[in-house]
Image (cartoon, rainbow, N blue to C red):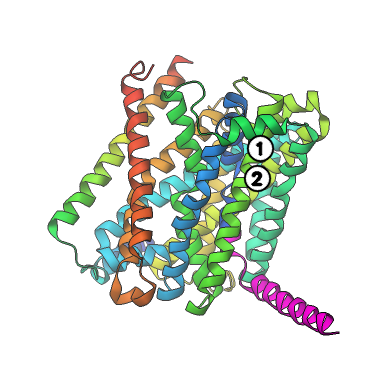
């Protein structure tokens, strides 16, 4: 329990340390990056779906 | 006399250059050859068997792609003295940092599973049961990393890299037609049509040549090795040499299976080895030994990439130059990755070969996000100064990102609409 607490504290400390990004990005760039990430995750999910199809069809 | 004096002078100069390179050599060569891992060998073997020599031209295109991507990590590491994970957290903040770290963890762990798939399959050909292979590999990899010095690890890794060249004599043993190799292989074509299966193989081949873990590994290795800005030219040469070797080895694997098993749908490199044993015992044995070596080298590098990334962010000691008591979490992460990935391989009836091919495709699909961050970091004038990307480097990097996104999208379309590109 103590170790878990220490880990959570460490994560909080990391979040505080890196709260402000050093490289300034406009909100348009940030939005584009988020859209790209979500799009790629969507593609990966599609591939997982394809994988499941192949496995279940034998 | 003058001639001999000049010859002596030039030979001394050349020897000094080689000696200097041998000191700097390592991260680029190791990461590129390690990329020809068990999944890579399987992908190349399957590509050769399915398309013969017809995709060799595509593999050649991957030399500059791999070089330009990995060269950026050399500059970033040498200039900032920071690993890739730390550079992302620092440059883009905690949100994107955790996102990237999570990506890396998932893809690394999946890739590690494929290394164990390859290693167990390779040694199964020689009669070794999978559980024994898993235990032996974990013990061997622990010993390699625990010896306490980056230099020793790197030289051992370079030895494994040399073993990767076993495919070259293997290709000569099957007596391929050079005319057919040059004719079919060097003229760009899409044999079998521009369809979902072709997209899958193209993506899998890209995924075996550049992968997210390589960015993290090479940058961290550059930092751990202590490379300075003045070493960047040698780091570039190291990376270029590695890119050429990795693709040359890939081409020789394609030639082996393209010559002996043309038109056959093989599921794995191990299956290819077994079939090749029937044709030529030595070639089959070479393929199996190379598969094990590739899996081992890949597994070491991938586990290290993850441990380095975690160490950088959590502030744990994270160098191979530290002892286990000085960096317990670094080594614990390394071992945890190894043991859990090894355990997956022992699950009965798991579709291991299919997992191997899909992991390559998933890795390449997630790559553009990592590449975009890399390019943005390389354009940060405040940290990179004169070493920041030029316009040409940005155009090449951007072109690679767009090409991968287009190819992933085309493959995604074929998953949803299987008949669309028939």
Neighbor class of circle 2 (other Cα within 10 Å; few <14, some 14-19, many 20+) is many
Residue B390 is at least partly visible in this image? yes
Residue B359 appears in the rendering: no
Q: Quadrant of residue B91?
A: bottom left
Residue B140: quadrant of the picture: bottom right
Residue assigned mark 2: B249
Q: Do the residues bearing badges 2 and 1 touch, measured as CB atoms within 8 Å?
A: yes
The magenta-colored residue range is B1-29
Is the residue B259 above or below the residue B236 in the image? above
SS at badge 1:
helix
Picture coordinates of residue B405 (x, y %)?
33, 40
Residue at x 35% of width, y 15% of height = B419
Residue identified by numbered label 1:
B253
Q: What percent of the width, then of the height, locates residue B375?
A: 34, 59
Q: Is residue B209 magenta?
A: no
Q: Position of residue B194 (x, y in %)?
A: 42, 24
Whole-angstrom CA distance, mark 2 to mark 1, is 6 Å
The residue positioned farthest toward the right in the image shown: B1
Q: Residue at x 63, y 46 (%)?
A: B248
Dot 1 crowding, Cα within 10 Å, few <14, some 14–19, many 20+: many
Dominant secondary structure of the residues highlighted in magenta in the image: helix
């Amino acid at each position: 329990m103590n170790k878990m607490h220490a880990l959570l504290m460490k994560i909080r400390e990391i979040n505080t340390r890196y709260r402000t990004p050093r490289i300034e990005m406009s909100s348009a760039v940030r939005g584009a990056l988020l859209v790209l990430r979500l799009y790629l995750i969507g593609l990966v999910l599609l591939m997982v779906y394809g994988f499941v199809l192949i496995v279940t069809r034998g | 006399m003058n001639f001999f004096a000049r010859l002596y002078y030039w030979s001394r100069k050349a020897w000094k250059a080689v000696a200097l390179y041998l000191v700097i050599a390592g991260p680029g060569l190791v990461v590129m050859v390690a990329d020809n891992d068990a999944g890579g060998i399987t992908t190349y073997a399957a590509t050769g068997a399915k398309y013969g020599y017809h995709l060799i031209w595509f593999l050649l295109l991957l030399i500059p792609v791999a070089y330009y991507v990995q060269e950026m990590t050399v500059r970033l590491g040498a200039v900032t003295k920071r690993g890739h994970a730390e550079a992302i957290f620092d440059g883009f903040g905690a949100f994107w940092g955790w996102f990237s770290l999570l990506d890396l963890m998932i893809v690394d762990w999946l890739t590690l599973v494929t290394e164990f798939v390859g290693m167990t399959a390779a040694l199964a050909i020689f009669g070794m049961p999978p559980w024994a292979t898993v235990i032996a590999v974990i013990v061997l990899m622990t010993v390699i990393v625990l010896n306490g010095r980056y230099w020793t690890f790197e030289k051992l890794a370079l030895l494994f890299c040399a073993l990767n060249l076993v495919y070259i004599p293997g290709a000569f043993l099957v007596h391929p037609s050079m005319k057919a190799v040059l004719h079919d292989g060097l003229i760009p074509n899409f044999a079998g049509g521009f369809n979902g299966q072709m997209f899958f193989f193209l993506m899998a081949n890209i995924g075996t040549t550049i992968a997210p873990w390589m960015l993290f590994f090479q940058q961290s290795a550059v930092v751990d090795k202590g490379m300075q800005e003045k070493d960047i030219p040698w780091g570039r040469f190291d990376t270029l040499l590695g890119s050429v070797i990795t693709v040359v080895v890939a081409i020789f694997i394609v030639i082996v299976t393209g010559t002996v098993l043309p038109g056959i749908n093989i599921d794995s490199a191990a299956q290819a080895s077994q079939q090749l044993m029937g044709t030529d015992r030595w070639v089959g044995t070479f393929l199996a030994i190379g598969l094990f070596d590739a899996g081992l080298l890949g597994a070491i590098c991938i586990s290290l990439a993850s441990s380095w990334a975690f160490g950088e962010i959590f502030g744990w000691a994270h160098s191979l130059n530290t002892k286990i008591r000085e960096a317990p979490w670094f080594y614990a992460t390394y071992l945890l990755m190894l043991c859990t990935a090894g355990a997956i391989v022992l699950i009965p009836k798991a579709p291991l070969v299919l997992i191997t091919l899909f992991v390559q495709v998933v890795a390449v699909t997630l790559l553009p996000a990592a590449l975009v961050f890399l390019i943005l970091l390389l354009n940060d004038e405040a940290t990179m100064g004169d070493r920041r990307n030029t316009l040409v480097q940005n155009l090449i990097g951007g072109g690679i990102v767009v090409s991968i996104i287009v190819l992933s999208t085309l493959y995604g379309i074929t998953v949803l609409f299987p008949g669309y590109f028939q």
